[in-house]
Image: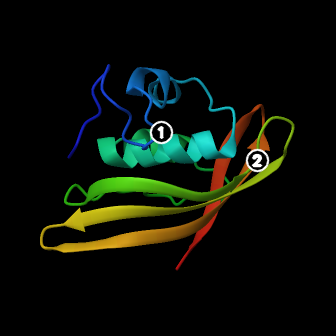
Amino acid sequence: MTKARDGGLCPCGSGIAYDGCCAPAHRGEPPATAEALMRSRYSAFVRGDSAYLRDTWHPGTRPDVLDVDDGTRWQGLEILSAEGGSGDRRGRVEFRARWRDGAKSGVLHERSRFVFQSGRWWYLDGVVD
């Protein structure tokens, strides 16, 4: 499992140091936009942080059990489109995430839905192609 180090580049691909990008969200500061939440969730997958993934999934749609596959190595995130910022109640993020699991590799293409509720963004669900 790849771990983002404080001071190193953030795994979400923003080009920003982890400390100034996804680390604040992982430490409890709610992301300001749907895209920022998506990036922080991707970084949580990279880090194997299932607690963060569960805590940012809307209680009405999250599964009872959320397991992160330790064999999957996430290798890059590409945001294709994003909606949902300050003042919005709904957001959508379309992305591609490259992965490798042993000799297998692929790309996860998802259109995710988000909602702003109780003063923070939540992941609702997504459609995977």
Residue 11 point in image, percent of width and height: 36, 41
The residue positioned farthest toward the left in the image shown: 103
Q: Is residue 92 visible?
A: yes
Q: Tell me: residue 127, above or below residue 61.
A: below
**Residue neighbourhood size for the residue with mark 2, other residues' Cα within 10 Å, grouped as few (<14), some (14–19), many (≥20):** many
Numbered label attached to residue 84: 2
Residue 110 point in image, percent of width and height: 54, 68
Numbered label attached to residue 41: none
Q: Which amino acid does label 2 sit on?
A: Gly
Q: What residue type is labelled 1?
A: Ser
SS under mark 2: loop
Count up the numbered dots.
Answer: 2
Residue 117 point in image, percent of width and height: 78, 41
- Residue at left 77%, top 43%? 116
- Residue at left 76%, top 47%? 84
- Residue at left 43%, top 69%? 108
- Residue identified by numbered label 1: 14
SS under mark 1: loop
